[in-house]
Amino acid sequence: MDQHRQLGHVGLYLGLDRPDYDFYELVRHVGRLDRTLLESFATHHASGLDILSSPGVLGGLPSVSLDAVERTLDFLAEVYEYVVVDLPHGLDDFNLLTIDRCDELYVIATADVPALRDLSVYIDRLVQCSVTPAKLKLVINRFCPQDAVSLEQIQTAIRQPISITVPNHSAALMSAMNAGAPIAPDQKSEFTRQMKKWAGGLVPTAEVVQKQPKRKFSLWG
């Protein structure tokens, strides 16, 4: 689900240039929202994902209420075992509402001083908004062990552990984004290894699911 209010990229990354409907159109119909309506609004991807894209036009922001968004999120959490949400930058009321509803919040930053300054500010604000440490997960993107700022320095500066690092894989990622086709998980690279590790943390093994059934609602920030 892409919660950007306009021009989000989730659909494009998956080869969906102009989906018929977007997330906010579904929100506007929350009064009659059921599985049949959801089935007609979601785009079904060959990978097995159901996708709710963001509006693909530049213009006025979608006019929806916080209550309608909350009811839609609650419905999606009941229908799907896992819901992954791509949030826009900022901590406005809509983002804070979604963060409050989620089980895990992944905040993604790169290991450069401007990004880490922003990351520190975000974390302080999230703590002020009562986001628990157990929910907050930090991801360092485009990480290189030779970076001037080390992981230990980052963790000391932001006073939070780093959950995962994603190595720089820019050439392959650029090709994948331009083609609208995700990188195949069977490729042998440090990037795919780390992404599998991340996915494994999101989706428990079948044995764990049987012992501790739990719906997960995760977000990318």
Image (spheres, rainbow, N blue to C red):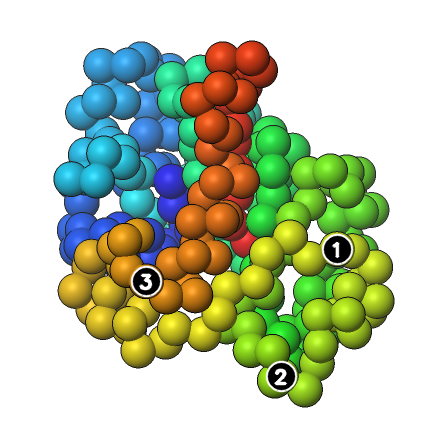
Q: Position of residue 192 (x, y in %)?
A: 38, 58
Q: Nearer the viewer, mark 1 or mark 3?
A: 3
Q: Position of residue 157 (x, y in %)?
A: 82, 69
- Reading the image, the residue beneath label 3 is 188
What amino acid is at disc 3?
A: Lys
In this rendering, would 92 be left or right of 83?
right
- Reading the image, the residue beneath label 2 is 147
Residue in view at x 27 percent, y 53 percent: 186
The mark nearer the N terminus, 2 or 1, is 2
Kindly tell me whether residue 207 is visible in this rendering.
Answer: yes
What amino acid is at disc 2?
A: Asp
Q: Position of residue 7 (x, y in %)?
A: 33, 58
Crowding at label 3, few (<14), some or many (≥20) Cα neighbours within 10 Å?
few
In this rendering, would 189 be left or right of 130?
left
Residue 28: mark in rendering: none
- Reading the image, the residue beneath label 1 is 161
Crowding at label 1, few (<14), some or many (≥20) Cα neighbours within 10 Å?
some
Crowding at label 2, few (<14), some or many (≥20) Cα neighbours within 10 Å?
few
